[in-house]
Structure formats: C-alpha cells, structure tokens
Image (spheres, grey):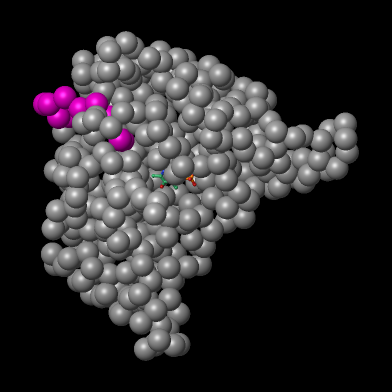
C-alpha cells in the first residue's frame, strides 16, 4: 500500500474558520431573523475594476482567432506584464528589480508554500506570532517541524512575538535563523513596519545569511510615502530577501488569481558541500517543471491594473476599503476600545475589552450585535486578547456594524 506524507498528520485540525462557521451556524439556527454582518473574512467584496474586465474581454476575443490565439505562455509570465510591474511598482520606489527576477503566478498563497520546494529540510525557520497560518502549515507539511505542543505551537519552529509592547514588530533575534517570514502591512494585525525596522532585519539577514520571506500582499494600502512598500527599498535586500506580491487585495483578484514572486539573482543559499547556489535558478527550474503559467486572459487583466484607468480604479478601491477601516477605527476608539492597525491596511486589530478572551469577545459580539469577527488567538498565542475586524465590506455594513456596537455593546 502507498505511504502517505505523515507530516500532514501533525497539522492541527483547521480550527479557526471552521469553529467560527460552527458558532455562526448555531447562532443563526437559534436566531433565524438575526441580520448577521460578517467582518471576519479576508476576502474583498467590491467588483473587479472595469479596466481589468475590459482587458480580459479583449483577451478572450484574441483567443478567438488563429492570429492572436495564445497557447502555453512563458512559465515566468509574459514580459509585457513583468515590465509593467518593474516600471510602476519598483522603479518609482528606487528598487533595483529586473523583469526577469519576477515570476508571475496564480497566487501568493501557493508561492509562499511552494517556495519551500527549493530549500532544504534542516533550516532554522521563524514566523511571527500572530501569523498568517499558511507559513506555518506549509512548513509542517514539508517536514520542517516536529509535532504541535498542547498550546498548538510546533516544535522546531521559532515564534517571534508581535505584541503591543513592540508595536507588533518583533525584536530582532540574538540567535541565527536561516529563514524568517515577515508580512507588512501585516495580516492579521493591520500594522506596518518602518524602514528603520526593516533595515534591522536586512542587516541581521546579511550577517547570518538568512533568507527573509517578505509578504507584501497589502503594500498598496500604504499611504505614507515614508513606509517601505517593498523590502527592496532597503539596501542589501537583494542579497537576502524574496518578495511575494499579489493582485488579490489591491485589484480584487481573489477569485481571478494573479500574483508574483521576486527572486533576485543576488540571492544564494548553500548546498551541503558548501557550494553557493543561486535561488533564482532553482525557482526558475521549479516553476518551469511544476507550473505552466497563468492564463493569458488573466495576465491581460493584471496588466490593465497599470493602465491609466486601472491605476485610478484600483486606487479608488483601496481608498474605499481604507475609509471603511478608518470608520471602524474611529467608531471603536470613540467607544473606548484600544485599536491598532487599519491605517495602512484593511484590518483593524482591537484589544478585547475587560480582558475577555478572544473567543469570549467573539461570542459577546455575535450575541449582542450579530457581528462576526475573527478571534486573534486563532492566529497564534500572542493574538489572545485581540480581535480582527476586516474592512473588506460594503460601507453600509460597516456603518451598520459600528452603530450596533455603539448602541448594543457597553464596555
Ligand atoms: C490575502 C493574502 C495573500 C494573497 O494570497 P493570494 O493567494 O494571492 O490570493 C497573501 N498573503 C497574505 C498575508 C494575505 O492575507
């Protein structure tokens, strides 16, 4: 009989979102007339920008005649899209990124998991706590951890605590690590990292030959030009960082699927014989072997993000979500809540009132206001006592939700 990858058995049962679903279902059954507002999900709500839809419609037409039909495209993505990314996202921020260092893909979720294919199994790996769970689970699947302890943390994985005391930017460790996952603007806390902070990480990584896995899925939500939008704004990052980007959150591509990963040619890691190998070459080999590219139609849609209309429409989308976040922040603060994030990110991270646990606050909010959020403890131990509200919603729902909190929840 075939053997399974036993690492999968170490995975904690997907607990957070199923448990939310279970509690919401039980509540709806008991209260069939309740008008539940969901502010828990990290998915966008607004339609795809018109510029992207027009471009994809035209691309479908292209597929209808032999002259303009497209079969397999380049595995790395079409040059016209990679060139636009460099021109619009990197050159203006003085980042030295070449078009052939960009690998177009169907999602950052896949890329952050797949990247482990090209790394060995005996690396010292760190994630932040709280964390986007994909980084953890993909390392478990790969066999990079031991079993989970009774608090749900995996042995062999390092957890860097992101707390209110350190502004949700964990202390730089005083021990060597081989791989560190960073996500800024952060999911779930909605907080950002300054250039000074990221420089400390790059300096650390250059000393210890660490690879920084930098997830910049929310970079377009940054409105302060002083806050880095890319790790490559930091000198030396080409030698130590891989950057993950996605069209999911800035252009509403969560259901359309387009993202990209940057692997600089300066980035190396060692083979067991001590030889330094370029990760760009390995990732290129991995992608050309296991991936046949993103559809022509979708890449045309992504390219349209960089058209004049596309830039304006995506900016409107982002401003819309940021205004939602501002409304959430201000409404909660005026009610006496302590709130974090939500300024350069679509997530507000609030401290639960009266020292309630994250799940107790979840139940209170659901019962008293019929609002669903995400318990912070679901993202890691340091998330206990916090709660995530997502600004990905209609304005109407956001306003109604905050009105309910003001009128029905006294803290
Ligand atoms: C939404 C999100 C992504 C984007 O994932 P896709 O697979 O590109 O949709 C990446 N990282 C984080 C932290 C996210 O929240």
Q: Which residues are magenta?
A: 172-182
Left or right: 395 with respect to 294? left
**Residue in view at x 27 percent, y 70 percent:** 362
Q: Horizontal and vertical percent for residue 371?
A: 37, 72
Residue 66 on the magenta span: no
Q: Do we see residue 250 in this rendering? A: no
User: On screen, 358 above or below 236?
Assistant: below
Dominant secondary structure of the magenta stretch? loop
Q: Which is more toward the observer, 221 or 26?
A: 26
Q: Horizontal and vertical percent for residue 161?
A: 17, 43
**Residue in view at x 62 percent, y 44 percent:** 313
Q: Horizontal and vertical percent for residue 316?
A: 57, 46
User: On screen, 352 above or below 164?
Assistant: below
Q: Horizontal and vertical percent for residue 111?
A: 45, 37
Residue 24 picture quarter: bottom left
Name the quarter where the C terminus is drawn.
bottom left
Q: How many badges with numbers are in the image? A: 0
Residue 177 on the magenta span: yes
């Amino acid at each position: 009989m075939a053997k399974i990858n036993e690492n999968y058995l170490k995975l904690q049962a997907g607990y957070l979102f199923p448990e939310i679903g279970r509690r919401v279902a039980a509540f709806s059954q008991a209260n069939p007339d309740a008008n539940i507002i969901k502010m828990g999900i990290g998915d966008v709500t607004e339609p795809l920008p018109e510029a992207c839809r027009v471009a994809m419609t035209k691309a479908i037409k292209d597929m209808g005649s032999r002259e303009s039909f497209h079969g397999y495209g380049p595995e790395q993505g079409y040059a016209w899209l990679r060139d636009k990314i460099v021109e619009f996202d990197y050159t203006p921020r003085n980042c030295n990124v070449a078009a052939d260092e960009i690998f177009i893909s169907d999602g950052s979720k896949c890329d952050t998991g797949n990247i482990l294919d090209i790394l060995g199994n005996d690396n010292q790996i760190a994630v932040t706590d709280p964390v986007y769970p994909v980084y953890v689970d993909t390392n478990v699947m790969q066999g990079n951890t031991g079993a989970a302890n009774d608090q749900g943390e995996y042995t062999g994985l390092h957890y860097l605590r992101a707390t209110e005391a350190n502004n949700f930017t964990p202390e730089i460790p005083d021990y060597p690590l081989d791989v560190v996952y960073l996500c800024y603007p952060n999911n779930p806390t909605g907080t950002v990292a300054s250039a000074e902070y990221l420089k400390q990480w790059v300096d650390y990584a250059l000393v210890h030959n660490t690879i920084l896995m930098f997830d910049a899925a929310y970079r377009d939500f940054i409105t302060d030009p002083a806050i880095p939008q890319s790790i490559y704004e930091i000198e030396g990052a080409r030698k130590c960082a891989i950057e993950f980007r996605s069209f999911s959150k800035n252009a509403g591509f969560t259901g359309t699927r387009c993202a990209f990963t940057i692997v600089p040619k300066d980035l190396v890691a060692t083979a067991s014989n001590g030889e330094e190998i370029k990760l760009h070459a390995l990732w290129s080999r991995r992608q050309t072997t296991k991936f046949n590219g993103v559809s022509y139609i979708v890449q045309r849609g992504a390219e349209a993000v960089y058209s004049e209309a596309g830039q304006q429409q995506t900016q409107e989308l982002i401003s819309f979500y940021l205004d939602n976040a501002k409304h959430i922040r201000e409404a909660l603060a005026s009610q006496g809540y302590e709130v974090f994030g939500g300024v350069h990110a679509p997530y507000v991270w609030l401290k639960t009132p009266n020292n309630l646990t994250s799940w107790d606050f979840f139940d209170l909010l659901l019962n008293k206001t019929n609002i669903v959020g995400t318990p912070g403890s679901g993202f890691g131990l340091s998330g206990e006592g916090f709660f995530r509200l997502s600004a990905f919603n209609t304005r109407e729902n956001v306003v109604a939700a905050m009105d309910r909190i003001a009128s029905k929840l006294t803290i």
